[in-house]
Amino acid sequence: MSFELPNLPFASDALEPHISANTLSFHHGKHHNTYVTNLNNLVGDTDKNLEDIIRESAGDPGKAGVFNNAAQVWNHTFYWNSMKPGGGGAPSGGVATGIDAAFGSFDKFKEEFKNAAVTQFGSGWAWLVVDGGTFKIVKTANANTPIVGGQNPLIACDVWEHAYYLDFQNRRPDYAQAFLDHLVNWDFAASNLE
């Protein structure tokens, strides 16, 4: 079996004005698709799933290309699902309870999540994860992903420049704020918590 580029879970213009169809045409149609193509060229037909390929290649210098492309396929697919049209606002249920327990308040969570997104030097990701039953905010560089360390991701914000530069230029803080206020998909987070 070979891997395929998953469809976006929304129309290409559905996240406007925060993320444009133009950005998604490049980010999904070019960047994400290139990771899928590269991964297929590296692993050929395989019965392994993406998570197994990521875990097996993590930390192996001889498999860095496999890891980087597999992890970027997984991370991007997770990122698309971490957003929805009309998203943002505050979560409810177990996600709200976990955030309050870990950060003291939703406002404090937003402050810390935005800080993680803004301070990730260079390319990478900001994540809300569950680690040992506790909600945590982590940031990863380049293609790295929390699933390698056994953490359970709930949401991800892509802070590679190609995720936001056409719409926000060098204003990563504004992009991170728009992600939290208008895009984040708390229903997806809740499904990952179950």
Image (tube, rainbow, N blue to C red):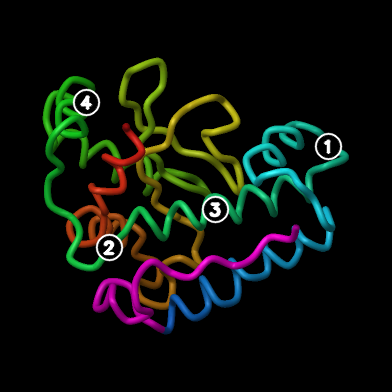
Q: Is residue 194 left or right of residue 89?
A: right
Upstream in the sequence, badge 1 or badge 2?
Answer: 1
The residue identified by callout 1 is 61
User: Helix or strand or loop: what does disc 1 sit on?
Assistant: helix
Is residue 2 one of those drawn in magenta?
Answer: yes
Image quadrant occupied by the C terminus? top left
Q: Is residue 93 left or right of residue 129?
A: left
The residue identified by callout 2 is 84
**Front label number (3 vs 4):** 4
Three-letter residue code for mark 1: Pro
How many angstroms separate mark 3 from mark 4 (CA)? 28 Å
The residue identified by callout 3 is 123
The residue sitting at 38% across, 66% down in the picture is 9
How many angstroms separate mark 4 from mark 2 (CA)? 21 Å
Q: Is residue 27 left or right of residue 108?
A: right
Q: Residues within 10 Å of mark 4 (few under 14, many from 20)?
A: many
Upstream in the sequence, badge 4 or badge 2?
Answer: 2
| Start-end of magenta stretch | 1-21
Q: Residue furthest top?
A: 132
Position above or below: 33 against 145: below
Q: Position of residue 174 (x, y in %)?
A: 27, 61
Is residue 73 one of those drawn in magenta?
Answer: no
Upstream in the sequence, badge 1 or badge 4?
Answer: 1
Q: How many marks?
A: 4
Three-letter residue code for mark 3: Ser
Q: Position of residue 85 (x, y in %)?
A: 23, 68
Residue 53 sits in quarter = top right
Three-letter residue code for mark 2: Lys
Upstream in the sequence, badge 3 or badge 2?
Answer: 2
The residue identified by callout 4 is 98
